[in-house]
Image: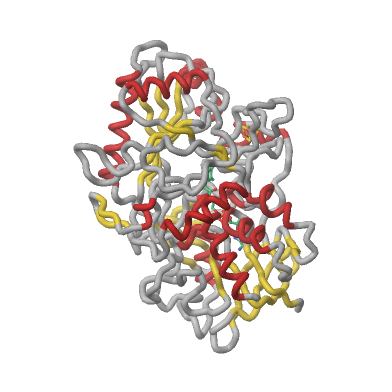
């Protein structure tokens, strides 16, 4: 069995970023990724393939709600879910790291605060080529530096929306985006600013993701070995249960055993918890590192609503996802509890709408909706609940989740409809000023976090403040699992920043 210094399992926002941080450490690193490189093919930008046929999602079936089938909207590729994400890379707010009172409960305090994360957020934004502009978002946390790249500009319809919102006293700002777009030199810009970005892979490799920004630049290093199509099936401890002895991995059709001084799990919050649970042994009978019985619990995925606002004005925007609003993040004058975050989505077309519409909806209606709609994504904070959890039944993954903390979030949805109604209304084939709300079902696990939370108390947390298991001395986790609470902005930048932070700790440990 070959011996490595570090094994990293998974190459998404957490694992890929950690690999990049450690690539020049001189340490012998083995990376195990269950997926392959995502193929570059015309279907990358085909909405029927991507949304209706779910070409890039796993075909794996989980269980939920007792024994019902669950087809998860998740992807296994080099780069993990960042291959298909929207690239909106937000920092959590300073207050998100504190104990926050919500209308229906409390979101937990983090054991490490914003100030400790700030330099790593800056490092992560640089690593992922984030474009943005500081000073516009009224809830923006302290920043030590401006973004390295200018914000992605609004197209005319979105600029008009921006101006209308400002007239009503709101504070729209540019979404911080990880795309390699050079608007000053379009000829040489890798990004062509197309209409198939959010939710699609990028055919021209211009979206910043964990594969392109982190994994591929690490591969020329002789100390780095990547095995793709290498699914880790079990972590095996030594006889006392104090350390991971070796990792069992199914590489293509061959079962391998791999050994390292340090093992870092980064399979995504659901699969990391599943791996620890199914690796139980006599020293860890409820699953690895699970004396606390917290492994797999406290699963969060945000409260999410996709909203289609049908406007009187046509919306010819190509790349629409440039504007966000946090004016109600912490509440409003009538409601003193957090409500959530509002951002634009990529512009939907008729084929994307068709994947959600009843089969009898005529194409002309879908076309009219698509050409007049503005697409929004609203996110609220769900609270950690022990009953929202991952369990394993043999090899079958069960995911149970009940929404909570909906009062503030429903107020946000109503508030936003009201704001949009004030700046636009009217009528045509379908009535204008109509807002179609689509709640995201349990299969929408894009923002999965929380299943192995970090903390100082081994009774209530699984990981310590360096994201090392309290119980197993060489086991770390660097994906979204460690979040004690979810905030209401997209999670990836925090996962990346945390992986960089843990990378510094590991560099010290392995010196
Ligand atoms: C459509 C979509 C849009 C999104 N948009 C945004 C956005 O705009 N902004 C944002 O911040 N977030 C966004 N997200 C969420 C974002 O993609 C995730 O937060 C992020 O990728 C999570 O990082 P992770 O490291 O926890 O897990 P992942 O990125 O999922 O990585 C986990 C990796 O582990 C691998 N793996 C799993 N199990 C095993 C195993 N047993 N053995 C070996 N390898 C394994 C997987 O193949 C994968 O590569 C979006 C997600 C989706 C699906
Ligand atoms: S908008 Fe740019 S980054 Fe996004 S898919 Fe198109 S070319 Fe790629």
For the point 36% across and 72% down, the residue is 460
- Nearest the viewer among 332 and 264 is 332
> Which residue sits at x=71%, y=50%?
37
In the current view of this chain or complex, which residue is farthest to the top? Answer: 428
Nearest the viewer among 509 and 161 is 509
Residue depicted at x 39% and y 34%: 325
Q: Residue furthest left?
A: 334
Please state, as top left, top right, bottom left or bottom right, where the N terminus lies in the image. Answer: bottom right
Q: Position of residue 502 (x, y in %)?
A: 55, 65
Task: Report the front residue among 380 and 54.
Answer: 380
Query: What's the residue at 59%, 27% (across, down)?
Result: 195
Q: Position of residue 10 (x, y in %)?
A: 62, 60
Tell me if residue 83 can be seen: no
Q: Look at the picture and state if 442 lies above or below 132.
A: below
354 vs 17: above or below? above
As drawn, is 98 to the left or to the right of 272?
Answer: left
Residue 38 drawn at (x, y percent) = 69, 46
Picture quadrant where residue 303 is located: top left
Q: Position of residue 370 (x, y in %)?
A: 50, 21
- Residue 193 falls in image quadrant: top right
User: Horizontal placement of 197 versus 416: left or right?
Assistant: right
Query: Relative to 96, is 201 above or below?
Result: above
The single residue placed furthest to the front in the displayed view is 144
The C terminus: image quadrant: bottom right
* Residue 416 vs residue 34, the one in the foreground: 416
């Amino acid at each position: 069995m070959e011996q490595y210094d570090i094994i990293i399992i998974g190459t998404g926002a957490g694992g890929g970023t950690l690999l990049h941080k450690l690539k020049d450490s001189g340490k012998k690193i083995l990376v195990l990724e269950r997926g392959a490189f995502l193929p570059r093919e015309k279907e990358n930008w085909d909405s029927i393939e991507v949304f209706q046929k779910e070409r890039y999602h796993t075909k794996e079936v989980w269980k939920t709600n007792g024994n019902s089938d669950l087809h998860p909207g998740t992807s296994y590729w080099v780069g993990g879910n960042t291959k298909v994400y929207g690239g909106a890379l937000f920092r959590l707010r300073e207050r998100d790291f504190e104990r926050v009172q919500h209308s229906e409960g409390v979101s937990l305090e983090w054991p490490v605060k914003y100030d400790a994360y700030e330099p790593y957020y800056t490092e992560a934004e640089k690593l992922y080529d984030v474009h943005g502009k500081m000073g516009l978002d009224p809830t923006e946390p302290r920043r030590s530096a401006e973004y390295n790249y200018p914000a992605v500009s609004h197209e005319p319809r979105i600029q008009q929306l921006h101006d209308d919102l400002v007239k009503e006293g709101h504070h729209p700002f540019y979404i911080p985006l990880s795309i390699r777009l050079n608007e000053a030199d379009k000829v040489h810009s890798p990004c062509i600013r197309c209409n198939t970005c959010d939710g699609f892979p990028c055919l021209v490799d211009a979206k910043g993701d964990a594969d392109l920004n982190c994994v591929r630049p690490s591969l020329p290093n002789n100390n780095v070995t990547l095995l793709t199509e290498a699914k880790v099936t079990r972590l095996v401890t030594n006889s006392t249960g104090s350390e991971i002895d070796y990792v069992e991995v199914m590489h293509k059709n061959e079962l391998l055993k791999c050994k390292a001084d340090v093992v870092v799990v980064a399979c995504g919050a659901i699969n990391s918890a599943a791996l620890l649970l199914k690796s139980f042994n006599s020293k860890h009978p409820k699953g690895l590192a699970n004396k606390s019985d917290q492994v797999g619990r406290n699963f969060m995925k945000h409260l999410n609503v996709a909203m289609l606002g049908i406007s009187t004005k046509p919306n010819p925007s190509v790349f629409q996802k440039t504007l966000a609003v946090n004016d109600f993040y912490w509440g409003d004058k009538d409601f003193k509890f957090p409500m959530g975050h509002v951002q634009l989505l990529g512009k939907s077309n008729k084929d994307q709408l068709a994947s959600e519409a009843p089969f009898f909806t005529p194409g002309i209606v879908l076309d009219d909706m698509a050409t007049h709609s503005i697409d929004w994504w609203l996110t609220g904070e769900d609270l950690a609940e022990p009953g929202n959890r991952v369990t394993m039944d043999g090899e079958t993954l069960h995911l149970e989740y009940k929404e909570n903390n909906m009062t503030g979030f429903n107020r946000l949805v109503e508030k936003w409809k009201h704001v949009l109604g004030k700046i636009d209304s009217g009528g045509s084939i379908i009535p204008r000023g109509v807002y179609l709300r689509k709640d995201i079902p349990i299969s929408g696990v894009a923002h999965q976090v929380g299943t192995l939370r970090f903390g100082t108390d081994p009774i209530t947390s699984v990981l310590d403040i360096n994201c090392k298991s309290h119980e197993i001395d060489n086991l770390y986790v660097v994906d979204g699992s460690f979040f004690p609470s979810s905030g209401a902005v997209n999670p990836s930048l925090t996962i990346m920043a945390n992986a960089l932070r843990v990378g510094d700790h590991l560099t010290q440990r392995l010196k």
